[in-house]
Amino acid sequence: MAQITLAKGLNQGLRAALEADPKVIVMGEDVGKLGGVFRITDGLQKDFGEDRVIDTPLAESGILGTAVGLAMRGYRPVCEIQFDGFVYPAYDQIVSQVAKIHFRSQGKIRMPIVIRIPFGGGIGAVEHHSESPEAQFAHTAGLKVVACSNPVDGFHMIQQAIASDDPIVFFEPKRQYHADKAELDESVQPAALFSSRVVREGSDATLLAYGPMVKTCVQAAQAAADEGQSLEVIDLRTLSPLDLVPVVESVRKTGRVIVTHEATVNLGLGSEIAARISEQCFYSLEAPVLRVGGFDTPYPPSRIEDDYLPDLDRVLDAVDRALAY
Amino acid sequence: MTDSVHAESGTAPGAAEAPSTEGTDLGVVFGPGSPAVSDESGTAPVQLLTPEGERREHPDYSFDLDDEVIKGFYRDLVLTRRIDAEATALQRHGELGIWAQLLGQEAAQIGSGRAMGPQDFVFPTYREHGVAWCRGVDPLHLLGLFRGVDQGGWDPNENNFALYTIVIGAQTLHATGYAMGMQRDGVVGSGDPDKDAAVVAYFGDGATSQGDVNEAFIWASVFNAPVVFFCQNNQWAISEPIERQSRIPLYQRAHGFGFPGVRVDGNDVLACYAVTQAALRRAREGSGPTFVEAYTYRMGAHTTTDDPTRYRLSEDLEHWKLKDPIARVKAYLVRGGLADDAFFAGIEQEAEAMGEHLREGCRALPDPSPLSIFDQVFVEQTPELAAQKEQFAAYLASFEGAH
Ligand SMILES: Cc1ncc(C[n+]2csc(CCOP(=O)(O)OP(=O)(O)O)c2C)c(N)n1
Ligand SMILES: [Mg+2]
C-alpha cells in the first residue's frame, strides 16, 4: 500500500476525478505546466491535455466567472485559487453568482463547481499567503464548505466534492501538503463527505478542529495524556453544513468542549458551533464552550506567526480553563 | 534635470498639432488612428541605446542629458543589481523567507524611477527595488517584508513611495485615486513645473488580466487622471508566458481605453527615462494617463521559491543575456572613453559597502513584539482588542520563568 502526502492524495484524487468524468476541468493560475505552486496538479496537464487542465489568465474573477458558464454548459470546473488571500477578486462571483444560481433558477441550473483554496499559516510566508477565510464562505447561503486535514481524506474528499452537484469551497491546509505521510488503502470505503469524525477518543474534554488544527489538537491530546487528561479530538471536516452528531455525542460524554481554528475568533466557525452546542447540550455542559483561534488582527508578519497561531500550549491552556469549572 | 529634457522633444512630429504642450504628445504619436499602432512596425520598442552600447536616434524621443547623468544611471543600475543579489543570497542563508528578484529589469526601474520628480508619487508591486532606490528608500527597509518582521517598513509619505502591493493589480486603482486627489489639489496643469505632479503605477504583464487593472484604466481615462501606467512586461507571470494574458502587444490595449500606449526597450535605461519623462510631462500638464510597456525579461526565477526550469527554456535566457541592461551602458561609457577604471572601481566599492550594509542590517532587524499587533489595527483601539492584548500578555507572562 502506498504512503502518500496530502499533496499526493489531492493530486491522485484529482487524477481519478479527471479519469472518471470527461466533464471535469481543472483551472487556475500556474496549474498546468508548473503543476501549481504547491504541485497539487503536477503532471495533470501532461496527461489530460490543455483543454482539461487550463492555465488561466491572471484573473480570479475570471476563473470563477467562466466556471459558472462552463458549469451551465455541463462541465464540472475545479478551480484553484493560488493562496487564500487571493480569493477576494473572485468573491463577488462566488457569493453573488455561484452561490445563488441554483436557487434563482428554482433548481433548473446546477453549479457543480469546486473551489480549492490552500489555507492557513505556519509556512513563513509574506502577507496574504497565510489566511483562513473559511467563515466568510460558510456564512454564505448556497455554498458548501469543507476542509481536509490528512492525505487519505484529501484523496477521497476532493473526488466526493467534484462528484457533488452543489458548489463546494474546498480548503486545504497548506502547511500539511508535504508534511506527513499516511497509508492509502483504496479498498476502504471513505466516510461521507459531509460528516465529521472522531479521530481520538477521550473522556475529560472534547477538542474540535479542522484543517491544520487537527494535527495540533491530536498533539495536544497526546501531551495531555501524559498528564493524565483524556481528551477527545474531532475532525469536523465539513464546515457548512456542520455535522454535529459526533460532537453532541462527545459533549454529552465529556461536558467540556474547546473549538479551535486559525481564523480569527470573532464570528469564526467556533461562534456558530458554540451556539449550537449550548442549544443542544445545555444540560450536559460543565463549562462554557471555549474558543481558541487567531486574534482579531490581520495576520501578522511571519516572524511572529508562531505567537499568533493557536498552538499546543494555547489549546492546553483552554483545556485547563475548561477543566477548572 | 527636468528642464533640459523638456528641450528634447521639440523635434517630435506631431508636436506642432498638440495644443498646449512643448513636449512629445503621445496622444498624437501613438493615439487612436495613428498608423504606428495598426501596422506591425508599431510594435518595435523605442530604443536609444543598443545592446552593443551605441546611441540611437528616435523620431519621437531623445535623451539629451549629459554623460554625467548616464554615469549616474550606471551607478544606480549596478547598486540595484547588488541589492537584488545580496537579498537573494540572504534568502539562501535563511535570513529572508523569500525574495522577488528584479534581475534583468534594472533599466526599466532606474530609467522610470529617475524620470520622476520628488513631487511625483509611486505605487509599486513587490519587485520595484530599483524604483525604491531612486526614491531614496533605504534598501534595508525593503528586506523587512521578505524577512517577515513587518509588512512594509518605510513611510510611504516620506519618499512618495507606497508600500509594496502583493495582491496583483490592486495598486493601479490606488494610483488612480491618488492622482484624482492631485487633480483636486491643483497640482496638475498649473503650469509650474516644480509643482505639477503625477503618479506612476507599476505592474506586470500578468497583472494586465486583472479586473482592477482594467478598471484603473477606465477611471484614469474618464477622469483624465495624471497617471503613468508603467507595465514591466518581463514575459512571464510565474510559469505563464505573456501569450496567456494577451493576443496583442500590451501597449496597444491603451487605445481601447482612450489614452496613448508606447512600447519601450525595457533594457535600455535611456529610452525608459525618455519615454517615462514624456509620459509624466503629459500627466502633469493635465493631458491624462499614458500606458508605458517596458519590454524586458525576468532573468531570474519568479521568486526564490520558484523553479523556472519546469516551464521555460534556458535558450531564452541566453538570448536575453545578450540584451543585458547594465552591459550596454558600460560598453557605451568605455567605448566613448567617458569613464575610467577609477570610476568603475569606485562603484564596485560602493556595491561592496551596500552588500555589507544589507547583510549586517538584515540580521539586526528586530522581530516585532507579539503584542504590537494589537496596537496597529485601528487608529482608535477597541475595548475588545485591548482586552485580547491584555489576556495575551498575561498568557505570555505565564511562561516566563517556567522554562
Ligand atoms: C490576486 C492575486 N492572485 C495571484 C497572486 C499570486 N501571484 C503572485 S505574483 C504572480 C504573477 C504576477 O505576474 P506579473 O503581473 O507578470 O508580475 P511579475 O511577477 O512578472 O513581476 C501571481 C499569480 C497574487 N499575488 N495576487
Ligand atoms: Mg511578469
Image (cartoon, coloured by chain):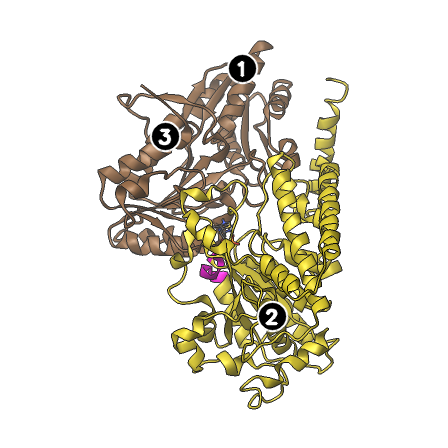
> What residue is drawn where x is 63% and y is 59%?
B330
Q: Residues within 10 Å of mark 1 (few under 14, many from 20)?
A: some
> What residue is drawn where x is 66% and y is 54%?
B78
In the rendered view of the protein, which quadrant contains the C terminus of chain B? top right
Q: Is residue A33 above or below residue A195?
A: below
Secondary structure category for the residue under label 2: helix
Tell me where residue B132 appears, x and y as whole percent: 67, 56
Distance from Cα at disc 2 to Cα at disc 1: 62 Å
Tell me where residue A243 appears, x and y as whole percent: 40, 31
Please name the residue that numbered disc 1 is placed on. Answer: A222
Classify residue B220 by image quadrant. Answer: bottom right
Q: Is residue B396 above or below residue B219?
A: above
Magenta stretch containing residue B361, yes or no?
no
Colour yellow, chain: B
Q: Residue furthest right?
A: B401
Q: From which residue to which does the magenta span run?
A: B206-212
Question: Chain for mark 2?
Answer: B
Query: For the residues tagged 2 and 1, is the chain the same?
Result: no
Classify residue A12 by image quadrant. Answer: top left
Please name the residue that numbered disc 2 is placed on. Answer: B276
Colour brown, chain: A
Residue A9: give its label: 3
Residue B399: give its label: none
Query: Is there any visible trace of residue B381 in the rendered image?
Result: no
In the rendered view of the protein, which quadrant contains the N terminus of chain B? bottom right
Q: Is residue A4 found left or right of B138 in the rendered image?
A: left
Give the amino acid type for the residue marked by disc 3 in the picture. Gly
Q: Residues within 10 Å of mark 2 (few under 14, many from 20)?
A: many
